Amino acid sequence: MKKLVLILLTLVPILAGALINASTAPLGMLLYYALPILVLVFWFWLGGQYAETDWGMLPSVLIGSATGIASLVLYVWQFCLESEGTRNLFLAGLSQMYAGSTPLYVFSFIFRLLRLGDMVQTLLVHEVLAVILMAAVFLAGYRRKKHRNGA
């Protein structure tokens, strides 16, 4: 049962991204800056919870990152492989919720550095960076818990 709960908790970034996306000012600005930091703290904690299972490090990180990887695949499908006329708006929106829960403002210097001209390219880079960041935070939480437990 605990493993099922842990798997379901990997949906939190998608829900947080949807909340940020749906919020309006002034609450929207507070959520835009604060909620991504809270999601990262939660993701670190969740990595530690996965360390207490018998899955091992690689399966834990892959399971924990599955929603991010699925979001990235959806994004590529909807924005790189489909035209505007064939794009499914629900899937296109859903594909951006995971990355929307990460601190986009942290990545802004990378976007300026890469000088991406196309919004789809910029958001694709954001999607990839979000998956990498979340996997790194998750792994840090996992390794910290393993280290504290002496494993």
Image (tube, rainbow, N blue to C red):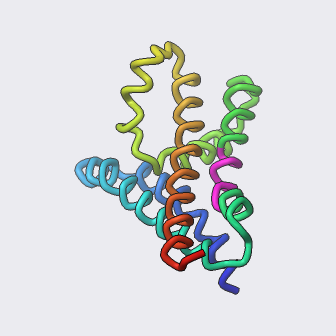
Q: Is residue 105 left or right of residue 149?
A: left
Residue 53 or residue 124, whichever sits in front:
53
Residue 115 against residue 25 in the figure, above or below: above
Residue 105 or residue 46, whichever sits in front:
46
Q: Which residue is found at the position 43% from the left and 57% from the top?
A: 40
Residue 81, x across and y down, in percent: 76, 26
Q: Which residue is found at the position 41% from the left and 39% from the top?
A: 104
Residue 48 or residue 127, whichever sits in front:
48
Count up the numbered dots.
0
Q: Is residue 71 left or right of residue 144?
A: right
Q: Which residue is found at the position 63% from the left and 44% from the top?
A: 95
The verdict on residue 69 being magenta is yes
Instruction: Name the quadrant of the N terminus.
Output: bottom right
Residue 5 against residue 129 in the figure, above or below: below
Residue 97, x across and y down, in percent: 54, 48
Instruction: Name the quadrant of the C terminus.
Output: bottom right
Q: Residue furthest front?
A: 150
Which SS does the magenta portion mostly show?
helix
Q: Which residues are magenta?
A: 64-71
Residue 33, x across and y down, in percent: 30, 49
The verdict on residue 1 being magenta is no
Q: Which residue is found at the position 57% from the left and 38% from the top?
A: 127
Residue 6, x across and y down, in percent: 63, 74
Snapshot quadrant of residue 5: bottom right
Q: Is residue 110 left or right of residue 73?
A: left
